[in-house]
């Protein structure tokens, strides 16, 4: 675990999950030829970049950018200029991707995304969403976590940890018969060094955290929170914190220490309803002490947003992102529900999908349909499937005669899965087209699994149907915005 990851863990920067469902493919449905380009995913957008070898790798001076004052789009009275586009592109695309290798079609989609964001921002401003109480509460919590993240990152970076050669050797010798049974010392030396450093960092942070808690008192009148008691004199079995919310949950000093066991920290994404459970105590310790107690310390040490530019900029980015997500969730998705009848109907209509059936199959993959038909003809005339796979297939499975082994539903692309599960044992399918090319599939075995019950699958079905409704609602909302703001895009100006 590197320093940044460790600091993120300590800061517990798991933000409230209210993100807009992402589309699974580009708007124009385009695919990328294997070997001709690579795909970079940024903020739910796929950027296809040309091969980075050869002529495409131009020098920085040769990279074409759009003139700063060139107007690329108009949304109402607002304009998106070249300087806005270039800055946003630089912000979103990883630095290792040469800008001159990004395809024009992807730049056009990126501009369209900027226009969509602009319309959403205008709608949010019109609805005065900054005054929304839920948004204010979320941002108050996020501010604490952002402050804490920067504060603890600096703490970690400034705390120098050294591990001696002898300590590394002692650790290796102690664990030689278990952890390093087949590993030579020189091959694992660096890994042991990092492991010992991280262990010491965790010990340092735990001590720092507990020492701070012992000398600091959090006073609050907020619902659901009492104050941290003087825990300097408490042992592991005594009460450290009281949380009130219809009933009490206690956190002992021992619970606080356990919260630093990274294998036991509970993710905020997991719903924990039992206030008296150890998991809930660990979560409260992690959230309450770090976010409310240490962030107050950080503010007093110069990490308040109005005194720290890094914190201010990060908060502004997160604020804009969360504002959009909360707006979509509360305004666009607010009436979306999935009825039990809809869940049952989906289950009955797709009952075969809820079986644990498996198929064992081999295949031959080629680039053209013509070649696939030619191979299919040879197979029908009696040619050996395994030998043809070794000779003609472009899939790595060719080394095994095309054998893919056993697979269940959801493991292959849809077209391949449908054909393989529809065929009987010993049958060969007609030529199947997928995003990878053209396949001839031979089913060599079928294993019938048990039927999963409706109750077991209900949460998954509900999520799937809800997602479909959200996508439809998003599309309708997008149309509403376009009809209202009537954006103009000048794609011809994109180079």
Image: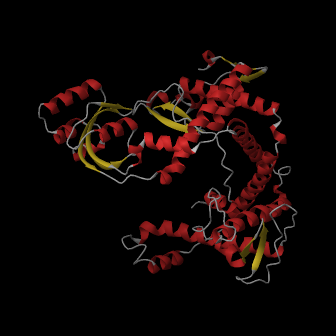
Looking at the image, which residue sits at the far front?
A: 341
Point out residue 114 in the picture as x, y percentages from the top left corner: 67, 29
What residue is rendered at 20% in x and 30% in y?
A: 376
Point out residue 275 in the picture as x, y percentages from the top left corner: 70, 68
Q: Is residue 149 visible?
A: yes
Point out residue 385 in the picture as x, y percentages from the top left corner: 18, 39
Q: Is residue 379 left or right of residue 134?
A: left
| Front in this rendered view, residue 14 or 97 | 14
Considering only vertical position in the picture, is 254 above or below 424? below
Total labels drawn? 0
The image quadrant that residue 255 belongs to is bottom right
Q: Is residue 333 left or right of residue 363?
A: right
Q: Quadrant of the N terminus?
A: bottom right
Q: Quadrant of the C terminus?
A: top right
Q: Is residue 85 visible?
A: no
| Front in this rendered view, residue 437 or 57 | 437
């Amino acid at each position: 675990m590197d320093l940044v990851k460790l600091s993120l863990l300590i800061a517990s920067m798991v933000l409230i999950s209210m993100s807009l469902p992402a589309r699974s493919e580009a708007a124009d449905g385009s695919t990328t030829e294997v070997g001709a380009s690579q795909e970079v995913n940024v903020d739910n957008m796929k950027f296809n970049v040309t091969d980075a070898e050869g002529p495409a790798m131009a020098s920085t001076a040769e990279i074409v950018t759009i003139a700063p004052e060139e107007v690329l789009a108009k949304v109402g009275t607002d304009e998106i200029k070249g300087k806005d586009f270039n800055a946003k592109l630089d912000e979103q695309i990883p630095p290792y991707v040469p800008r001159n290798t990004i395809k024009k079609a992807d730049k056009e989609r990126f501009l369209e995304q900027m226009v969509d964001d602009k319309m959403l921002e205008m709608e949010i401003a019109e609805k005065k969403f900054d005054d929304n109480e839920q948004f204010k509460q979320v941002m108050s919590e996020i501010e604490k976590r952002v402050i804490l993240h920067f504060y603890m990152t600096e703490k970690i970076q400034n705390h120098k940890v050294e591990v001696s050669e002898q300590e590394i050797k002692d650790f290796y010798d102690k664990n030689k018969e278990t952890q390093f049974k087949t590993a030579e010392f020189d091959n694992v030396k660096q890994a042991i060094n990092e492991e010992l450093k991280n262990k010491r960092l965790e010990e340092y942070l735990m001590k720092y955290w507990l020492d701070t808690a012992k000398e600091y008192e959090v006073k609050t009148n907020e619902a659901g929170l009492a104050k941290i008691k003087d825990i300097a004199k408490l042992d592991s079995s005594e009460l450290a914190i009281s949380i009130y919310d219809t009933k009490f949950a206690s956190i002992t000093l021992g619970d606080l220490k356990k919260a630093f066991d990274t294998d036991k920290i509970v993710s905020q994404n997991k719903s924990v309803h039992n206030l008296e459970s150890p998991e809930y105590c660990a979560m409260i310790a992690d959230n309450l002490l770090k976010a409310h107690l240490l962030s107050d310390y950080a503010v007093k040490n110069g990490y308040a947003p109005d005194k720290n530019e890094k914190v201010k900029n990060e908060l502004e980015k997160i604020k804009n992102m969360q504002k959009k997500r909360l707006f979509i969730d509360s305004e666009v998705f607010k009436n979306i529900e999935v009825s039990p009848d809809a869940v049952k109907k989906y289950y009955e209509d797709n009952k075969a999908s809820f079986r644990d059936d498996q198929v064992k199959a081999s295949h031959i993959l080629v680039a053209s349909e013509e070649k696939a038909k030619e191979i299919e003809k040879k197979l029908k005339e009696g040619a050996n499937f395994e030998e043809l796979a070794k000779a003609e297939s472009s899939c790595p499975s060719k080394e095994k005669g095309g054998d893919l082994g056993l697979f269940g539903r959801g493991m292959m692309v849809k077209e391949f899965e449908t054909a393989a599960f529809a065929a009987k044992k010993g049958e060969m399918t007609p030529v199947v087209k997928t995003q990878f090319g053209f396949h001839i599939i031979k089913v060599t075995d079928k294993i019938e699994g048990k039927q999963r019950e409706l109750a077991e699958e209900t949460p998954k079905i509900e999520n799937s149907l809800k997602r479909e409704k959200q996508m439809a609602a998003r599309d309708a909302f997008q149309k509403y915005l376009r009809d209202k703001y009537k954006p103009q895009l000048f794609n011809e100006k994109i180079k």
